[in-house]
Image: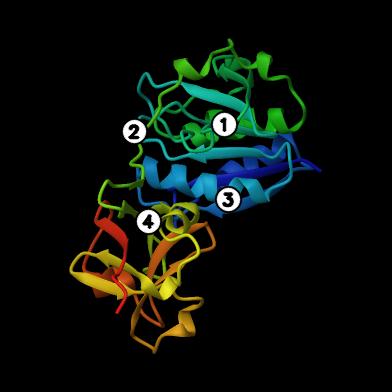
Amino acid sequence: MPVIALLTDFGLSDPYVGIMKGVILSICPQASIVDVSHDVEPQDIRAAAYLLDAAYPYFPEKTVHIVVVDPGVGSGRAVIAVQAGGHYFLAPDNGVLTKVLEDKDLQAAVRVENRQYFLHPVSRTFHGRDIFAPVAAHMAEGKSMDAFGPRISAEDMVQLALPAACLSEQGEVVGAVITADRFGNLISNIPEKLVRQLAPGKDETRLQVQVGSHQIKGLSASYQSVSPGELLAIIGSRGYLEISVNQGNARDFCGVEKDAAVVVKVREAG
């Protein structure tokens, strides 16, 4: 059974997601359609890139991942189909695939131009229905990627300049908040391995995390490691450092938004 995964900023109060599913099932009735998320902040390409990267490894190989976070809909931006890491991705060429293509084996990529596989007429505002859904359905049915358009290389695709965490000359890990989930957890771009590199073999209670004007001593093993309403730092399920509040909202507690600096350092003993 082919699997098609949907990631959009459409929300669920309008019929857009349901219409896309209807188009897919009309072409590929045996498809299993999975909703990754439809609550991406409108037009937030960067957040969608991180969400896709966090989700896709948990899907079966050959899953077709549709990403429709597309502020350029109706413009001259291209639609691309990519095969990488054993999966297929269909997205606007706006950089939303930047994370999944990092260090991945790019097996094939095409610019989707063959209108034979579109719905007609093609709307200026709803390419999710008229291009992405039908093309994904044909991909799921096993249509060769070359059927959809000409081959392109990684250099032909738009790439986002994503902020990267780093180990500074002062021996601190410097990163930033990349997004907040619906619980208000602040998710940083600091991977676990960089935190471990900062303090290999050292007690994690000696680490100090700073976000905004708040300082957090040590990493927590769980949300319940601190009292309700208390701020904590934890390695989240995505493998990145997160700032949370036990039974609360860290975004509101800290008063920070995306791109706020996050700094991790080792406190002096004593």
- Badge 3 marks a residue whose secondary structure is helix
Q: Is residue 5 in view from this perspective? A: yes
Tell whether 183 sits left or right of 111: left
Disc 1/disc 2 C-alpha distance (Å): 20 Å
Within 10 Å of the Cα at label 1, are there few (<14), some (14-19), or many (20+) other Cα atoms?
many
Label 3, label 2: how far apart the Cα atoms are: 21 Å
Q: Look at label 1 and name its amino acid.
A: Leu
> Which one is in front in this view, the residue at disc 3 or the one at disc 2?
2
Q: Which mark is residue 90?
A: 1
Residue at horizontal 40 percent and vertical 33 percent from the top: 125
With 140 as the anchor, is 224 left or right in this view? left
- Quadrant that contains the N terminus: top right
Label 2 sits on residue: 161
Label 1 secondary element:
strand
Q: Quadrant of the C terminus?
A: bottom left
Picture coordinates of residue 198, whole percent (x, y): 40, 56
Measured in 3D between alpha carbons, the distance from the residue under mark 2 to the one under mark 4, in whole angstroms, is: 16 Å
Identity, as a three-letter code, of the amino acid under mark 4: Ser
Specify the amino acid type for callout 2. Answer: Ala
In-front residue for pair 198/182: 198
Label whose residue precedes the other's in the sequence (1 or 4): 1
Residue 261's image quarter?
bottom left
Indicate the position of residue 128 as horizontal and vertical percent values: 51, 36
SS class of the residue under badge 4? strand
Residue beneath disc 4:
188
Residue 243 falls in image quadrant = bottom left
- Indicate whether 164 appears above or below 150: below
Q: Mark 1 touching mark 3, by CB under 8 A?
A: no
